[in-house]
């Protein structure tokens, strides 16, 4: 599925998004009210200390936990442009999406954080007026090893918080 003619035409079985959506654009979305403790998703532990373990997260509890982290720990506001460099397979993706509950606009980046250059995520921060930048400890270590200082090459005038995960 793609909106450009080149993309839709170059893929076997490709179709433009607008054509795919024909007949569905006016469909009402049905929402079901579920109990507070209804299972929302299953995530797995990393396996660094043994066999990965299945962890069931419940809808109400995880939203409250994430909302507390966004509002109390990160001071996320409805004027924020929130970014966390993550794939949708990492638990930080779920945390990022919960930023919508705090009213933030989410910024998504798909691709290597080092292509076409090591500056790409900071270019993205400047271009999009990012206010909260989250990433992994490994990314920060990799940037440190290049001896490059983002504050020397980027404005980052909208950025007010930088977040990082831990690392074993």
Image: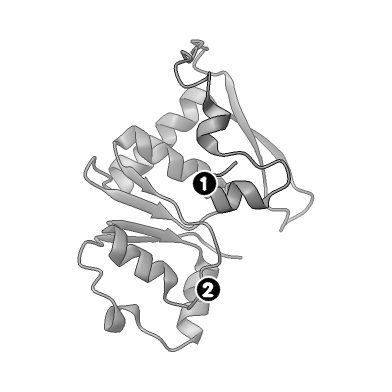
Tell whether label 2 touches label 1 (CB within 8 Å).
Answer: no
Say if 61 sits above or below 27 in the image.
below
Say if 89 sits above or below 122 in the image.
above
The residue shown at (44%, 40%) is 97
Q: Residue furthest right?
A: 51
Quadrant where the N terminus is found in the figure: top right
Q: Is residue 89 visible?
A: no
Total marks shown come to 2
Q: Nearer the viewer, residue 128 or 139?
A: 128
Left or right? Give the position of 82 relative to 159: right
Residue pointed to by mark 2: 115
Classed neighbour count for the residue bearing mark 1: other residues with Cα under 10 Å, few (<14), some (14–19), many (≥20) = some
| Color encoding of the figure | one colour
| Residue 22: percent from left, percent from top | 53, 24
The residue shown at (35%, 83%) is 149
Residue pointed to by mark 1: 93
| Residue 5: percent from left, percent from top | 54, 48
Q: Is residue 77 visible?
A: yes
| Quarter of the rendering containing residue 96 | top left
Classed neighbour count for the residue bearing mark 2: other residues with Cα under 10 Å, few (<14), some (14–19), many (≥20) = few
Labels 1 and 2: the sequence-earlier one: 1
Badge 1 element: helix
The residue shown at (29%, 41%) is 71
């Amino acid at each position: 599925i793609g909106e450009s003619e080149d993309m839709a035409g170059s893929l076997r079985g490709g179709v433009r998004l607008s054509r795919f959506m024909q007949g569905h654009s006016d469909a009402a979305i049905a929402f079901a009210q579920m109990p507070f403790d209804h299972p929302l998703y299953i995530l797995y532990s990393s396996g660094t200390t043994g066999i990965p373990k299945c962890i069931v997260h419940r809808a109400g509890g995880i939203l409250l936990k994430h909302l507390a982290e966004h509002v109390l720990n990160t001071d996320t506001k409805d004027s924020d442009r929130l970014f966390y460099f993550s794939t949708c397979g990492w638990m930080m993706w779920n945390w990022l999406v919960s930023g919508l509950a705090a009213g933030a606009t989410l910024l998504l980046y798909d691709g290597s954080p080092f292509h076409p250059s090591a500056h790409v995520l900071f270019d993205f921060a400047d271009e999009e007026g990012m206010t909260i930048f989250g990433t992994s400890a490994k990314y920060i270590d990799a940037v440190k090893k290049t001896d490059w200082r983002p504050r020397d090459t980027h404005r980052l005038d909208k950025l007010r918080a930088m977040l990082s995960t831990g690392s074993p």
